[in-house]
Image (tube, rainbow, N blue to C red):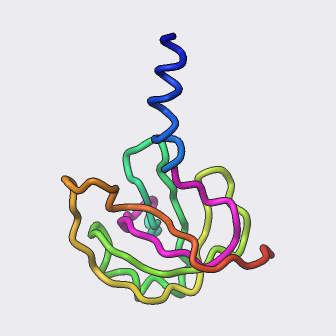
Amino acid sequence: MKIILLILFLIPIISKAQIVEACGIYNFRGVVRMIDYSPFLIVNEHTLSEYKFSIPISEEPRIAPYIDRAFELTATIEKRMDGTKGAVKNIQDIDYRVSDPLGETPDTGVKLIKKISCK
């Protein structure tokens, strides 16, 4: 009986988990952090579902004002991810966002906009 209750409790949590499996154009909501002198886009920071995306050198001037601040942007993932690590390209539509830690839905995440084939 306890196992059934545990499964019923976990199903809604698992169904809302964000998994980045396909290459494509994504909407990201997260933060940019400097790690070893390179900027990384981090989604779901300090959680078990944390994703880290490297940012190409050509995009660093555009991303610099957003370091250590909450943002929302659209970018492309062209290569398959290595677990929770990947790389983004073609950053578009970047803007600051206001965090809502008390909201019902998480204020960070990844949402697939358009699927494309991987290189």
Residue shown at the point (35%, 66%) measured from the top left: 31
The magenta segment: 17-36
In front: 52, or 22?
Answer: 22
Instruction: Check if residue 24 falls in the magenta segment.
Output: yes
Percent coordinates x, y for residue 84 in the rendering: 59, 52
Left or right for 67, reference 59? left
Quarter in which the C terminus is drawn: bottom right
- Count the numbered circles shown: 0
Classify residue 87 by image quadrant: bottom right
Residue shown at the point (41%, 54%) measured from the top left: 44
In this rendering, the answer to whether 108 lies above or below 7 is below
In front: 115, or 15?
Answer: 15
In front: 12, or 30?
Answer: 12
Residue shown at the point (55%, 75%) measured from the top left: 26
In this rendering, the answer to whether 9 lies above or below 117 is above
Instruction: Check if residue 48 falls in the magenta segment.
Output: no
Percent coordinates x, y for residue 99 in the rendering: 23, 64
Percent coordinates x, y for residue 36 in the rendering: 46, 60
Left or right for 47, reference 91? left
